[in-house]
Image: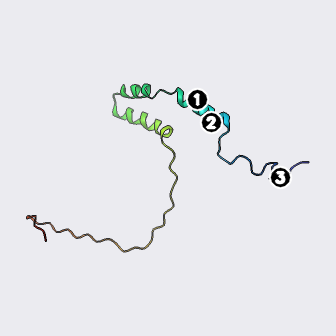
Amino acid sequence: MPFTKGNSGNPLGRPKGSLNSSANEFRELLSHSIDSNKIMEMLNKIEEPVDYINAVSKLLPYCLPKVKPVDTEIQDIEPVVINLHLDNDCKEQ
């Protein structure tokens, strides 16, 4: 019995973006094989500030999660008014 186009035999199957068990095992193995001390050692050998920043910026995507954009709507609100009184004498008013 063939399936109709767009319908699978398991409509409640694995969610999109979820990893299978072999991918999870590989990521775990890879994370245990990376020596953070060795990475710091290599970064500390970089003498030029620009090269150091470039190296760190290339490593950041592997350390920090991606930031999802936040949809914010600007509402009409009244501005905040701050009054500063600057005197030479510091007296309580």
Q: Quadrant of residue 53?
A: top left
Q: Nearer the viewer, residue 93 or 17?
A: 93
User: Within 10 angstroms of label 1, few (less than 14), some, or many (20 or more) residues?
Assistant: few
**For the point 81% across and 52% down, which residue is it?**
7
Where does the C terminus fall, quadrant-wise? bottom left
**Does the CB distance between marks 2 and 1 fall below 8 Å?**
no
Which label's residue is closer to the chain start, 3 or 2? 3
Which label's residue is closer to the chain start, 1 or 3? 3
**For the point 10% across and 64% down, which residue is it?**
90
**For the point 47% across and 35% down, which residue is it?**
59
Q: Nearer the viewer, residue 39 or 37?
A: 37
Give the SS element for disc 1: helix
Please give the residue where the numbered disc 1 appears in the rendered image: 29
Please give the residue where the numbered disc 3 appears in the rendered image: 5
Q: Position of residue 71 (x, y in %)?
A: 51, 61
Please give the residue where the numbered disc 2 appears in the rendered image: 24
Looking at the image, residue 48 sits to the left or right of residue 69; the answer is left
Mark nearest the camera among 1 and 3 is: 1
User: The disc labelled 3 sits on which kind of residue?
Assistant: Lys
**For the point 49% across and 40% down, which residue is it?**
61
Mark 1 vs mark 3, CA separation in Å = 38 Å
User: The disc labelled 2 sits on which kind of residue?
Assistant: Asn
Mark 2 vs mark 1, CA separation in Å = 9 Å
User: Within 10 angstroms of label 3, few (less than 14), some, or many (20 or more) residues?
Assistant: few
Mark 3 vs mark 2, CA separation in Å = 31 Å
Q: Position of residue 78 (x, y in %)?
A: 36, 74
